[in-house]
Image (tube, rainbow, N blue to C red):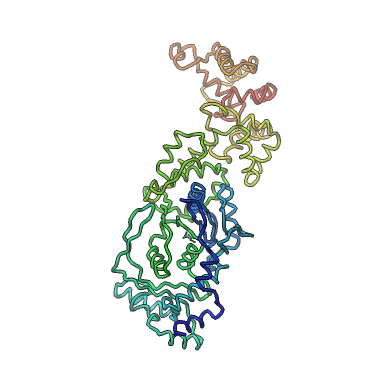
């Protein structure tokens, strides 16, 4: 046995598996030509960030589009940052967007032949590989304390040298295996580091599917691969996982690009072929004219829960993320307004390299458009679905009388150029509550009618009475409006502005002013959906009762 082999046995006495065993346990996948195997690999450290939804959506899309595999792997080796239950919460939130992994970690269970899919359950695999690296002399124990590492950092700072554990600063890399064995036997605390052969004066060349050919500085850091808690670090663990899980494409945030040289060196040393890489643009926000990363702390829209709680239709948020992902999506959308967004094919070369700008106004527009295109039944189903979790008031309005609710939200819907009254389901109750008598009473008790002061009480009364006596509820919309105009004309309300200009002495206002009075009384506010439909839905008795409220 060589000294390195003895060292490896000393560190991992219980590891009997070999890399060959693992290769057999996780054979090459049998997949159709062109199938992409990619993975979303969140750490269970909190809520679902909009940027993570973006990443997950892209993994899911590429796998769907190529009949590939979309894995979910839980990267939970950083136990200090872990938030209990957030792995499951993340999965549930993704599922709300119909982003459901085909394989991997599902909270209480797992699916697939390449598991376990939770890193904390994969220690045997990591230790097997590290043991092999130690045997080969490509990994070694490091005994430095925090203080000693701090000393090194200070020295590097004062000499203006690159920080980190490399070259002559990689003190423990100079220990012989024998010396290391002695220290371990003595009970000295250690972690395990990878022995880099790189030099930061060299460049490496890598291809990124989004960014093209890149020249990056070679890695020279002897990174920690096994921590003192016995768990591996991200750099090492994700790489073993991607290898044994048969990942073909790594689609992850741009923030990982700077550590790519570490991963490339590890792959080379292990003799494994690296997957293809696509580093996705980070989602940015324009803040007082400056670009910055969407921040968990500063921006409510950084949390996916914000969109869920406000009742944005999930498909609209996804559609927005599609526009961020591929620059030709919007053009496709304009030509295919009624198609499912998943009919669009993503390509890596249509990704933008610069940080994608997160634009809430654009999300609002997409959302309005999508909501307006739903049938009343679809709208009501989605509204109810949202309301059950987030909006009890809306839920009770729908359940009180679903057909009545549907008739309200159907105003100028299910037609060409439908009205875009709603941005999100949160808007529904304030917009339509006046249709319900209890809410209406409440509205008028708290906010008195605000008529245009240009008109006297008598003039207003006159308009209301004339309309009440000639409601025309059985007329078509056009007939009704013509009727309203002819009723209002003798009272001094012109059919339009032009007519008014022609005879300013006779007219005191236009039909718009008269309709506004009616609206204020019926809805308790100046803006309401189309008055004709408001009256159709309220019906004669309610209309008359409301008119009577005006003293
Ligand atoms: N666990 C890493 C994260 O939380 C995943 C990075 C990767 O996809 O490789 O972002």
Left or right, 317 with respect to 439, comes to left
| Residue 291 or residue 139, whichever sits in front | 139
Quadrant of res 392: top right
Quadrant of res 536: top right
Left or right, 351 with respect to 100, comes to left
Q: Residue at x 50, y 56 (%)?
A: 39
* Residue 173 visible, this orientation: yes
Q: Residue at x 35, y 76 (%)?
A: 154
Residue 95 rendering spot, x and y as whole percentages: 58, 50
Residue 509's place in the image compared with 346, above or below, is above
Q: Residue at x 64, y 18 (%)?
A: 473
Residue 383's place in the image compared with 82, above or below, is above
* Residue 551 visible, this orientation: no
Residue 450 rendering spot, x and y as whole percentages: 56, 29
**How many numbered marks does the figure carry?**
0
| Residue 284 or residue 70, whichever sits in front | 70
Residue 134 rendering spot, x and y as whole percentages: 45, 78
Residue 195's place in the image compared with 180, above or below, is above
Where is the C terminus found, in terms of image quarters? top right
Residue 58 rendering spot, x and y as whole percentages: 48, 50
Quadrant of res 328: top left
Residue 535's place in the image compared with 154, above or below, is above
Q: Residue at x 40, y 77 (%)?
A: 150
């Amino acid at each position: 046995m060589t000294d390195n082999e003895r060292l490896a046995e000393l560190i991992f006495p219980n590891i009997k598996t070999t890399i060959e065993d693992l290769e057999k346990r996780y054979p090459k996948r049998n997949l159709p030509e062109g199938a992409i195997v990619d993975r979303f690999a969140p750490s269970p450290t909190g809520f679902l960030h909009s940027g993570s939804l973006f990443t997950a959506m892209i993994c899911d899309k590429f796998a769907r589009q190529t009949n590939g595999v979309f894995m979910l792997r839980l990267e939970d080796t950083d136990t200090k940052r872990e938030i209990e239950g957030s792995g499951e919460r993340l999965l549930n939130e993704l599922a709300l967007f119909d982003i459901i992994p085909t394989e991997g970690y599902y909270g209480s269970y797992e699916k697939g032949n390449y598991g376990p899919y939770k890193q904390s359950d994969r220690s045997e695999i990591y230790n097997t590989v590290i043991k092999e690296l130690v045997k080969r002399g490509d990994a070694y124990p490091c005994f430095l304390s925090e203080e000693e590492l701090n000393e090194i950092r200070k020295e590097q700072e004062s000499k203006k040298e690159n920080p980190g554990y490399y070259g002559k600063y990689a003190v423990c890399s100079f220990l012989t295996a024998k010396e290391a064995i002695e220290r371990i036997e003595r009970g000295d605390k250690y972690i395990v580091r990878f022995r880099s052969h790189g030099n930061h004066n060299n460049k490496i060349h890598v291809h990124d599917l989004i960014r093209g050919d890149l020249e990056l500085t070679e890695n020279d850091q002897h990174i920690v691969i096994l921590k003192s808690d016995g768990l591996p670090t991200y750099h090492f663990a994700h790489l073993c996982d991607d290898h044994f899980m048969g990942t073909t494409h790594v689609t992850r945030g741009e923030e990982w690009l700077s550590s790519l040289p570490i991963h490339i060196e590890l792959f080379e040393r292990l003799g494994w072929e690296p997957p293809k890489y696509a580093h996705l643009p980070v989602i940015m926000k324009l803040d007082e004219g400056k670009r910055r990363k969407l921040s968990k702390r500063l921006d409510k829209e950084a949390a996916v829960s914000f969109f869920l709680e406000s009742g944005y239709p999930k498909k609209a948020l996804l559609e927005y993320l599609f526009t961020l992902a591929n620059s030709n999506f919007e053009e496709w959308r304009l030509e295919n307004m009624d198609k499912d967004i998943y009919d669009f094919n993503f390509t890596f070369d249509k990704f933008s390299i610069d940080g994608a700008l997160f634009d809430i106004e654009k999300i609002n527009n997409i959302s309005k458009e999508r909501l307006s295109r739903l049938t009343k039944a679809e709208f009501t189903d989605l509204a109810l679905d949202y309301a059950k979790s987030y909006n009890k008031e809306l839920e009770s309005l729908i359940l009180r009388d679903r057909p009545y609710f549907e008739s309200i939200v159907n105003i100028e819907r299910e037609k060409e150029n439908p009205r875009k009254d709603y941005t999100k389901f949160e808007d529904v109750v304030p917009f339509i509550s006046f249709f319900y008598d209890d809410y209406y009473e409440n509205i008028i008790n708290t906010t008195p009618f605000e008529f245009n002061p240009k008109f006297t009480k008598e003039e207003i009364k006159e308009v209301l009475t004339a309309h009440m006596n000639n409601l025309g509820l059985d007329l078509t919309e056009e007939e009704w409006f013509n009727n309203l105009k002819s009723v209002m004309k003798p009272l001094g309300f012109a059919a339009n502005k032009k007519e008014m200009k022609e005879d300013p002495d006779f007219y005191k206002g236009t039909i718009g002013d008269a309709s506004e009075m009616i609206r204020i009384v019926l809805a308790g506010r100046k803006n309401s959906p189309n008055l004709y439909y408001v009256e159709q839905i309220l019906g004669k008795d309610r209309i008359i009762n409301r008119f009577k409220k005006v003293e």
